[in-house]
Amino acid sequence: AGKNRGNVNPSWQLFIFGSGRRTIGPKEGWQVYSSAQDADGRCICTVVAPEQSLCSRDAKSRQLRQLLEKVQNMSQSIEVLNLRTQRDFQYVIKMENQMKGLRTKFRQVEDDRKSIMAKNFQELKDKMDELKPLIPVLEQYKMDAALISQFKEEIRNLSVVLTGIQEEIGAYDYDELYQRVLRLDTRLRSCMGKLTCGKLMKITGPVTIKTSGTRFGAWMTDPLAATRNNRVWYMDSYTNSKIVREYKTIDDFVSGVVSQTYSLPFKWEGTNHIVYNGSLYYNKYQSNIIVKYNFETGTVLAQRALEFAGFHNMYPYTWGGYSDIDVMADELGMWVVYATNQNAGNVVISQIDPDTLQVLKTWNTEYSKRNAGESFMICGTLYITNSHLSGAKVYYAYSTKTSSYEYIDIPFHNQYFHISMLDYNARERALYAWNNGHQVIFNVTLFHVIKTEDDS
């Protein structure tokens, strides 16, 4: 190898010294570039190269330096890229987990939507079930046979649709179906408005209006009042009181806003009073006398003894409370239900004149008054419950039109376990009840039989 620095080629020249086990050091102006040793630490070969300063001004040397710098820069860039890649990879993993969470939430929302839709459609189907009992009513209209047939077809079609929806949620527009049911319901109710009397088929509810007073009492509205007149009267307790409270509306009754208070001239017995055409009819304390008290004048317009009628817990309903004499009204007028010794303590029905309180006609039944839970009149038929406690049902019906009776089975929900007043309101087509300190309303479904002129 050349020994003179002046003879060194400008390009890098590497010289390798190695021969057996000899160790050769670099010459002056050269530097060790690399060396290798054996297991015992003895030099095998040494690579030397000129010092960088010797060729620092050489053009190719500068190019090499620039290449080295680029390699270093590229190495650093690759390192930065690697770090970014690692960071982005972690971000991707995080996003993937979030997407999985969102996918689960969307799936849950979808399941919830189906559940809500299923519930809504079930409510629609229940609505349809409520409408079905009205079909026999409409069938009585022979003149409207085509319209009735159309109603039946619409109900049948809607029932099929609703059944299909239950099997495949989301196949139909719920809002559209709901509007169809409402329109059909409106048309059916319009036909119902033409009807008058009917036979009791079903009792639904109750709807709790208010919770107030003692365990026993009475509350009522006037069935002969004008449509806009919704006054409520309230008589707490079954005896030893003369105070009647009046409320202008149901809302005032619920809120406890009393419009007027009346003090009756006589105490009452029981809870079976009514307001009829602006007057209160009730059983005078410790007597079989019916009193008619007018709210407008604040005076007693009439009073009359009910001949032979037991009173003061002689023949009460099953709950007692001096409920011997029950004054009531329906679509056909005013009635009074009681019991006499002459009829062996069984229920007696009398229709009375609301002005004079005179008995117009009387029917003797064979149902024990003491075994009756409560009773009410609808369209001239007396309905009697078998108990005032849980499990009570309408058990017996006596028709004054045919002077005949039948045993029936119409359940109703005695929500608060003790009924001390149950009275029918013909205007509202509902039963008002005092249910263990709760004022409630039951809805009734009637079967109407309408005869047209061409009926034989």
Image: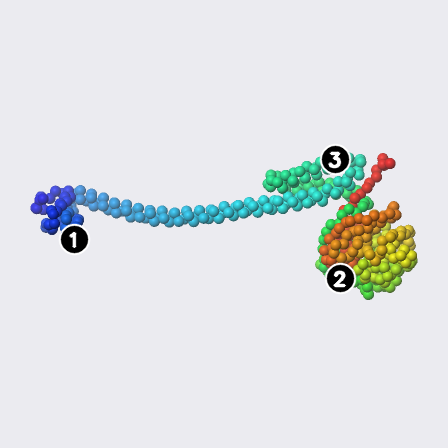
Most foreground residue, 95 or 62: 95
The kind of secondary structure element at disc 2 is loop
The kind of secondary structure element at disc 1 is loop
The numbered mark at residue 252 is none
Quarter of the picture holding the C terminus = top right
> Separation of disc 2 and disc 1 at Cα?
112 Å
* Residue 281 in view (yes/no): no
Q: Answer left or right for 26 relative to 276.
A: left
The numbered mark at residue 215 is 2
The kind of secondary structure element at disc 3 is helix
Q: Answer left or right for 63 relative to 165.
A: left
* Residue 187 in view (yes/no): yes
Disc 1 crowd rating (10 Å Cα; few below 14, some 14-19, many 20+) is few
Task: Give the farthest residue toward the left.
Answer: 4
First of labels 2, 1 by sequence position:
1
Quarter of the picture holding the N terminus = top left
The numbered mark at residue 40 is 1
- Please name the amino acid that badge 3 sits on: Ser
- The answer to whether the residues at label 3 and label 2 have Cβ atoms under 8 Å apart is no
Disc 2 crowd rating (10 Å Cα; few below 14, some 14-19, many 20+) is some
